[in-house]
Amino acid sequence: MIGRSAIACALVVTSWNHSLAMAAPDGKTRLTKDAGHADGNARAQWQHDVAQLTQAADHGAVGAQYQLGRMYAKGLGVAKDSAAALRWYRQAADQGHLASQYNLGVMYSNGLGAPKDQAVAAGWFRKAAEQGSAAAQYSLGVMHNNGEGIPKDHAAAVAWFGKAAQQGYVDAQYNLGLVYAVGEGVGQDYAAAAGWFRKAAEQGDVGAQYNLGVLYAEGKGVPQNYGTAATWYRKASERGHPNAQYNLGIMLLNGQNVAKDYVQAHKWFSLSSAGATDAKLSSEATQARAFVASRMTRAQIAEAQQLASLWRKQ
């Protein structure tokens, strides 16, 4: 019986959320239209908003400063200007505005409006994190994990991931599952890994769904249960996870606590092979598809191919 059952060994590659306006706008002004698609009246309203906000911001109104930073960052009613966005966010951040502190971290980390500076980014993320921003806590955890702008410190990374994860931040939940699974910054604990992967998986994180399936298949941190493993593999497979598609195909091929189904196995092997970025996985899925095809009729193969084609069009 062949199978692939490896927990992903790399942290989430999206080191932080690159949206420059995580929090809802402060104050009474609600900017809801995209100026790039606004009519003449709407553009006039945007210009009126900018004038009013600028007057308030010049008098120290923190909400107006944040709003102007957001508008210049996104080009809402004004020409997009990262330097101007940085300047207004800085004024609001210096007054303790959480979202502006986080957004400054994002801008410095990406070199928007100023030269890229991970140390400065980490400083602003820390200020926002200490005020309770889950996105900033997660970002600071990533920077500690990777040694970006601050010393590499896996224990500190775990602590910040934990704070964000407790607030429901899905990438932090996934990363906590991962560090507990591999024992990085904490003692290896598959039960804790399964718990955090489950929280992320229930929020729809495809990597967590796959890894939870692996833990159930191997009985690590949870009672071994191939049926539950197949359930999580299927969820991840429907979202396009090539490893999950391969593992689900293996279970369908072998009838491992699921009904044996060569047509479905062939479909998932085809999708895994086509979607895999890992050459080894692609090769294994191709070989597995050839193996199951040798046990199928031409009509069954045609049906499997049609199902794979329909899935790609979804």
Image (tube, rainbow, N blue to C red):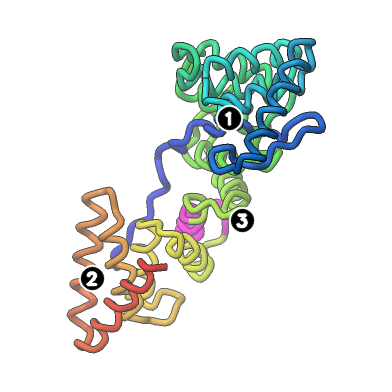
Point out residue 196 in the picture as x, y percentages from the top left corner.
60, 46
Q: Is residue 14 above or below residue 95?
A: below
The earlier-in-sequence mark between 1 and 3 is 1
- Residue placed farthest to the right in the image? 28
Q: Which residue is mark 3?
A: 202
Inspect the magenta stretch and tell me whether residue 59 lies in it: no
Point out residue 116 in the picture as x, y percentages from the top left corner.
45, 14
Left or right of 28: which side holds 98?
left
- Tell me if mark 3 has few (under 14), some (14-19) or many (20+) residues whose alpha carbon lies within 10 angstroms of its own: few
Q: Amino acid at mark 1?
A: Leu
Which residue range is magenta in the image?
A: 210-222
Q: Residue at x 71, y 17 (%)?
A: 54
Q: Amino acid at mark 3?
A: Glu
Q: Nearer the viewer, residue 218 or 147?
A: 147
Q: Which residue is mark 1?
A: 20
Q: Label 3 vs label 2: CA separation?
A: 30 Å
Left or right of 73: which side holds 117?
left
Q: Which residue is mark 2?
A: 289
Q: Is residue 202 above or below residue 253?
A: above
Q: Amino acid at mark 2?
A: Arg
